[in-house]
Amino acid sequence: MARHISLPEQEEYGAYYQGYINKVNGNPIDVLSRQIDQYTDLIHENSNRMDYRYAEGKWSIRESLIHLIDSEQIFAYRALRISRGDQTPLAGFNQDDYIAGNNFDHITPWEILEEFTHQRRATLSMIKKFTDQEIARIGVASDTNTSVRALIFIMAGHAQHHIELFNERYM
């Protein structure tokens, strides 16, 4: 079992992220680890329907998975910078801009799975090396005080949110 990371206090993150943090049941390191298998299964089960959208104007399975990877890269980058004591305010990002106007059709399900798995393992490797002091550090991201601890919960909760969306709307 991985070391326990305690639930962040509300002043450690923006209110927008409360929903993601609430989705983490247990230790976020364990949740992040389990999600590798969950997403592996999801991609295998849906490899022939990556362009499926549950409604017009909604992201396809492929786009949603790429969004998940993009977001984790950004959240992990924020966690790294804040953990190292960097107090430079970190800019926000518009998730829709990362998808709109881009064509991801050339990216196979297997390439998405490979990138997700590599990113998640790199994220876990980084988190496991953080000291308690680094996990507690707070910086500014998207104009909001944000702790490394909160970012760890946000990554786990964001991925859980998308698992739930896949199960509710894409299956």
Image (tube, grey):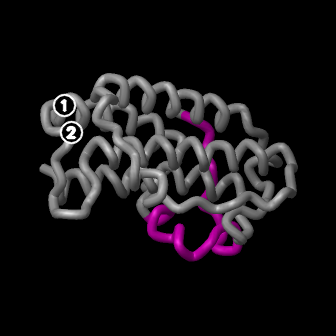
What residue do we see at 33% from left, 49% from top? 64
Q: Nearer the viewer, residue 72 or 135?
A: 72
Q: Magenta includes 11?
A: yes
Q: Nearer the viewer, residue 100 or 46?
A: 100
Q: Magenta includes 15?
A: yes
Q: Position of residue 106 (x, y in %)?
A: 31, 29
Q: Nearer the viewer, residue 118 or 34?
A: 118
| Left or right of residue 7: residue 31 | left
What residue do we see at 38% from left, 52% from top? 160
Specify the segment rendered in magenta.
2-22
| Disc 2 secondary structure class | loop
Q: In which quadrant of the rendered view does residue 45 lie?
A: top left
- For the view shown, which residue lies furthest in the front direction? 101
From the image, tell me which residue sits under label 1.
47
Label drawn at residue 50: 2
What residue do we see at 74% from left, 68% from top? 145
| Disc 1 secondary structure class | loop
Q: In which quadrant of the rendered view does residue 87 lie?
A: bottom right
Q: Position of residue 27 (x, y in %)?
A: 52, 48
